Amino acid sequence: MIQPHDSVIVRTLGHIVIPVAQLFGVYVLVFGQHGPGGGFVGGVVLAASMILSILIFGINAPNSVLARKMLHGDGLGLLIFAGVGGLCLIGGGQFLNYSHLQIPSLDEASQHYVGILLTQLGVAVDVAVTGVSIAVSLSFNEDEISLDEVTHG
């Protein structure tokens, strides 16, 4: 299992770099439809920041609580993505045709923006969960405790 890093310099830089990386990941996610980025890239940056937190502080540290909670989010991104598509279908359009997204009191341009943002959020959640779960599962040897014991105990 990954042991917490014992260097004061690394831990101090981790306290600075990790929140900045997470903020950048959210920025890339939210403004991805206007330039390079989007759900996949934002999810990768968020996953990398959470993996960095696990590497620096350890999986059971209070600083890694977001990474531990992300391990419970398997399938949540797919539900968000499919839910937005289903709302478009209920509105009488095609799957992910945001013109038919049923959100009261929004004009068509706002419906497009909210629809794109929600689908990109679903992609980002799935990418981040997958990245963190791969990194955590690779950190255990066969004779060590299981991933379930880390997330539940």
Image: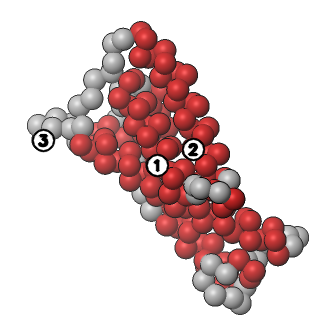
Residue at image x 63%, y 72%? 84
Label 1, residues with CA under 10 Å away: few <14, some 14-19, many ≥20:
many
* 101 w.r.t. 124: above or below: below
Q: Nearer the viewer, residue 49 or 125?
A: 49
Can residue 72 be seen in the rendering of this structure? no
Residue at image x 50%, y 57%? 40
Q: In the rendered image, which residue does mark 3 sit on? A: 142
Is disc 3 in contact with disc 2, using a CB cutoff of under 8 Å? Answer: no
Is disc 2 in contact with disc 1, using a CB cutoff of under 8 Å? Answer: yes
Is disc 1 in contact with disc 3, using a CB cutoff of under 8 Å? Answer: no
Label 2, residues with CA under 10 Å away: few <14, some 14-19, many ≥20:
many
Q: In the rendered image, which residue does mark 1 sit on? A: 44
Q: In the rendered image, which residue does mark 2 sit on? A: 25
Residue 91 lies left or right of residue 151; in this view the side is right
How many angstroms separate mark 1 from mark 3 (CA)? 27 Å
Give the image location of residue 131, x and y in percent: 38, 49
